[in-house]
Amino acid sequence: MEIHRKTVGTVLELSFSEWRDRCEPLEDEMAFRNLNKVAAGGLVLAGALGFVACGGGSNAGGSTASAPTPSATPMQVSLGDAPADWIMAFGMTVNSITLTNSAGATVNVMPASAATEMMQLMATVQPVSTLSVPQGTYTQAKVTVSSVSMGYMDPVSHAYTQKTMAGPFTATVPFSPSMTVGTAPAALNFDMNMASSVTIDGSGNVTFSPAMTAAMATVSGTSANPWQGGMQHQVGSVSSISGSTFTMGSMMGLPSATFTTNGNTQFPATGLPGMNMMTSGMMVAVDASLQADGTYLAQRVEYMGVGSTGGMGGGLITSITGNPPTQLTLAANAGQGGGMMASSIAGNLIISLPATVPYSIDTDGVNLTGLPFAPSFDAGSLVKGQRVNVVSATGMMSGSGGMGGGMTGTLGTLTASQVQLEPQALHGTVSAYTAGGSLTTFTLNLPSDSAFTTLTGVTTVQVYQQAGTQAMGTTAVANGADVQARGLLFYDAGTYKLVVGWLAAH
């Protein structure tokens, strides 16, 4: 396969005088500059790139020479997290990601900034951009982020504390070996090492210097696996509908995306049996796969049960009031709809629980069959440390308090219309590993500074690994292995039990 390494950046290095000498005359220098800007903007447009060229000197045959630009290939750019165990929520805005090629030219792969929350991305990644990138060899990336809002368990006081940092902060990510963008769609996955990026001293002073690695993978085209160019349970609000396609806006991750549906697209929730019942403003969760032409094919579209007047907030349960429970407090790490903003991340979100509120489980990607216990999630098995999404038909009522300077503010209150148990990840070392047929079990020993341990008092979690569990960065799990285990966390017979859908090396 031939890789074109000459970039548009090389063509754009021509001065006006050089262009005038080599090309047909332009009326003035401003015309050249305008053409230059148009060509530069074309670097990040979806689809094949055009030509930045001009007529050359005539040869004996009277033909003209042109300088071709490289072809472009669809790419999904995603971000994930290796954890800092004492942090519970970490929101930030990704402002720019630029790739540098072997000729020294740069390509911007973040046409628009995107908000994201890192702690919910342990052992997974979330797309922040999808576009077409010039084919060639790339040697490094530069990632700039800002507007950090984090919540953590203070290692001294053991109190939940909030911190904001304006930034900007920049990480340079070398590619070793260099990464080649060829003709096949690619997934570029950035992994932030949160433990190396965020530090806190004995006086409680927090510093942030982002440390990242990156890896490129071939896009599956048929899988929602986000490591391979898919997206899983991306929550957003439908903004437009046209035939078998719809566009969705999201507060976290990819700001806006258009999806195509077909006869194989699943619509599992009542209230949305198919595209003919979809309306603007509906809140949905989408699984999708990136196609060879750069579009997304929706594999699963789940209606969240609310429309444009509703809202959704998600996070880790930090406190429960009442028995049966009447109120929860969440360390917020997700949101959508009325009253929710990216700056809400890490704040305290109050959840009011009506007596009749339904409870459900997001089983997408996690196999709950063949277990030695009956996995359940209801008012009686709701416990601190679980990650939930709460949907409200009325949106969030505003709260009080601030986000900066270590103050703990209340974002507001959601009256729950539905409480759904969501996948989450825990980090630790493996012991008591027991393989058996289609189900493997082991004990996950949590680090001493784990926020989960501080919150719950629990130092170990029982893990159940199904045969279909996806492994990222590890081919086998054994005693002593340092892993991130991602799945659904249940509380059964007085014990925390994690049924995993993903395992990743730490």
Image: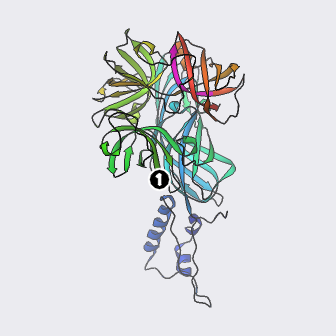
Magenta span of residues = 484-493
Q: Is residue 304 magenta?
A: no
Q: Report which quarter residue 432 is drawn in.
A: top right
Q: How is the image coloured?
A: rainbow
Label 1 neighbour load within 10 Å: few <14, some 14-19, many 20+: some
Measured as percent of width and height from the top left, residue 190 is found at 58, 42
- Depth check, front residue: 460 or 109: 460
Image height of 144 relative to 73, above or below: above
Whether 271 is drawn above or below 178: the answer is above
Assign a secondary structure to mark 1.
loop
How many numbered marks have been drawn onto this rendered protein structure? 1
Q: Main secondary structure of the magenta part?
A: strand
Where, quadrant-wise, is the N terminus in this rendering?
Answer: bottom right
Residue type, mark 1 in image: Thr
Location of residue 188 in the rendering, given as x and y in whole percent from the top left corner: 58, 47
Above or below, comparing residue 137 to residue 151 in the picture: below
Name the residue located 47 percent from the left edge and 16 percent from the top edge: 384
Q: Can residue 155 be seen from the camera position used here?
A: no
Q: Residue furthest bottom?
A: 60
In the rendered view of the protein, which quadrant contains the C terminus? top right
Give the left or right position of residue 5, taking residue 488 as reference. right
**Circle 1 is placed at which residue position?**
295
Q: Residue at x 40, y 34 (%)?
A: 343
Q: Nearer the viewer, residue 361 or 111?
A: 361
Q: Nearer the viewer, residue 143 or 2?
A: 2
Q: Residue at the spot x=59%, y=56% of the render? A: 184
Please provide percent x and percent y for residue 426: 58, 24
Q: Provide residue 427's location: percent of width, then percent of height.
A: 61, 25
Asked if one can make out residue 34 in the rendered structure from this viewpoint, the answer is yes
Left/right of residue 405 with respect to residue 309 in the rendered view: right
